[in-house]
Amino acid sequence: TVEAVEELGLAPGTEIVAIIKASDVIIATN
């Protein structure tokens, strides 16, 4: 979100690393 970017102090051209974590992992079998 725009608010998150402002809180982190990011600017255009700033190098960042995005870490994406799934909140839930569901494993099922048929």
Image (cartoon, grey):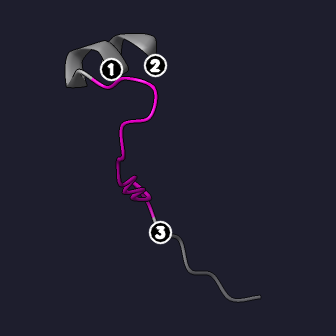
- Total labels: the figure holds 3
Badge 2: residue crowd in 10 Å (few <14, some 14–19, many ≥20): few
**Amino acid type assigned to the residue bearing label 1 in the image:** Ala
- Numbered label attached to residue 25: 3
Q: Is residue 19 left or right of residue 1?
A: left
Q: Name the spot of residue 21 as percent of width and height, x first.
A: 39, 58
| Residues rendered magenta in the picture | 10-24
**Residue on which the image places disc 1:** 4
Q: Nearer the viewer, residue 22 or 2?
A: 2
**Disc 2 to disc 3, how far (Cα)?**
24 Å
Which residue is farthest bottom? 29
Earlier-in-chain disc, 2 versus 3: 2
Please name the residue shown 45% across and 26% down the image.
12
Earlier-in-chain disc, 1 versus 3: 1
Dot 1 and dot 3 residues touching (CB under 8 Å): no
Q: Is residue 17 magenta?
A: yes
Which residue is farthest front? 13
Callout 2: SS: loop
Q: Nearer the viewer, residue 23 or 2?
A: 2
- Numbered label attached to residue 19: none
Please name the residue shown 40% across and 52% down the image.
18
**Residue on which the image places disc 2:** 1
**Disc 1 to disc 3, how far (Cα)?**
25 Å
**Amino acid type assigned to the residue bearing label 2 in the image:** Thr
**Amino acid type assigned to the residue bearing label 3 in the image:** Val
Q: Name the spot of residue 8 as percent of width and height, x first.
A: 22, 25
Dot 2 and dot 1 residues touching (CB under 8 Å): yes
Dominant SS of magenta comes to loop
